[in-house]
Image (spheres, helix red, strand yellow):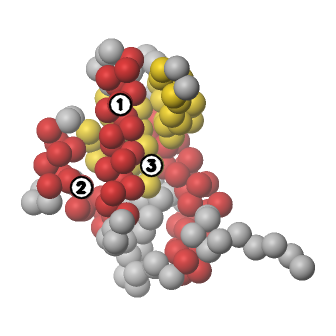
């Protein structure tokens, strides 16, 4: 019998996150690479995009539509991870959360009245929307439909 993965495990989302990071790197004209960072004895963390010079890091969230349930916590954990790396490295970084579309970014962006948006502003964490290829958007939407989390009208 063929083993299938849990529907929430999405290769499509991982590929889209990589594409989002590549798009931001192109726009910033820097090289951002997924990187494992040792931080302390028995402690390490992986960040989606990292560059030493200029000091920049980013985390991508490949989700179409407004976050639901625990999803805002996932985004905020990514922000906390970047703050932790910055603190442990002892230097200032440009910190970016990159989203798959405007609807996903909206609750975290500067115009929002949500505490998450105010927190990200207070810690100088930028929220940007990355560009995905049409075929990547299609695969991402299909993955979210399979997971039961796709909201109609999110990528029209």
Between disc 1 and disc 3, the foreground one is: 1
Label 2: how many residues lie within 10 Å, few (<14), some (14-19) or many (20+)?
many
Q: Which residue is under mark 3?
A: 60
Q: 152 or 120: nearer the eye?
A: 120
Instruction: Return the residue found at the far left.
Output: 113
Label 1: how many residues lie within 10 Å, few (<14), some (14-19) or many (20+)?
some
Residue 1 image position (x, y, % from top left): 89, 79
- Location of residue 5 by image quarter: bottom right
In the image, residue 145 sits, relative to residue 41, either above or below, namely: below
Could you give the CA–CA distance between mark 1 and mark 3, rounded to whole angstroms? 17 Å
- Location of residue 155 by image quarter: bottom left
In the rendered image, which quarter contains the C terminus? Answer: bottom left
Residue 1 appears anywhere in the view: yes
Q: Is residue 100 left or right of residue 18?
A: left
In the image, residue 91 sits, relative to residue 150, either above or below, namely: above
The residue positioned 14% from the left and 55% from the top of the image is 115
Residue 11 image position (x, y, % from top left): 65, 60
Residue 135 appears anywhere in the view: no
Residue 85 image position (x, y, % from top left): 39, 27
Could you give the CA–CA distance between mark 2 and mark 3, rounded to whole angstroms? 13 Å
Secondary structure category for the residue under label 2: helix
Q: Which residue is under mark 1?
A: 84
Secondary structure category for the residue under label 3: strand
Q: Is residue 155 left or right of residue 137?
A: left
Q: Is residue 87 left or right of residue 4?
A: left
Q: Are marks 1 and 3 in contact (CB under 8 Å)?
A: no
Instruction: Return the residue found at the far front.
Output: 42
Could you give the CA–CA distance between mark 1 and mark 2, rounded to whole angstroms? 19 Å
Q: Which residue is under mark 2?
A: 108
């Amino acid at each position: 019998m063929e083993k299938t993965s849990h529907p929430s495990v999405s290769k499509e989302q991982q590929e889209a996150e990589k594409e989002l990071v590549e798009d931001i790197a192109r726009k910033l004209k820097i090289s951002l690479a997924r990187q494992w960072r040792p931080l302390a004895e028995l402690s390490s963390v992986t960040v989606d995009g990292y560059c030493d010079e200029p000091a920049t890091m980013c985390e991508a969230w490949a989700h179409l539509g407004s976050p639901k349930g625990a999803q805002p916590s996932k985004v905020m954990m990514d922000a906390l991870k970047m703050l932790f790396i910055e603190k442990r490295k002892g230097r200032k970084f440009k910190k970016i959360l990159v989203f798959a579309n405007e609807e996903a970014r909206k609750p975290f962006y500067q115009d929002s009245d949500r505490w998450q948006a105010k927190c990200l502003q207070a810690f100088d964490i930028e929220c940007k929307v990355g560009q995905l290829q049409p075929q990547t958007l299609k695969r991402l939407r299909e993955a979210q439909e399979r997971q039961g989390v796709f909201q109609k009208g999110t990528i029209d």
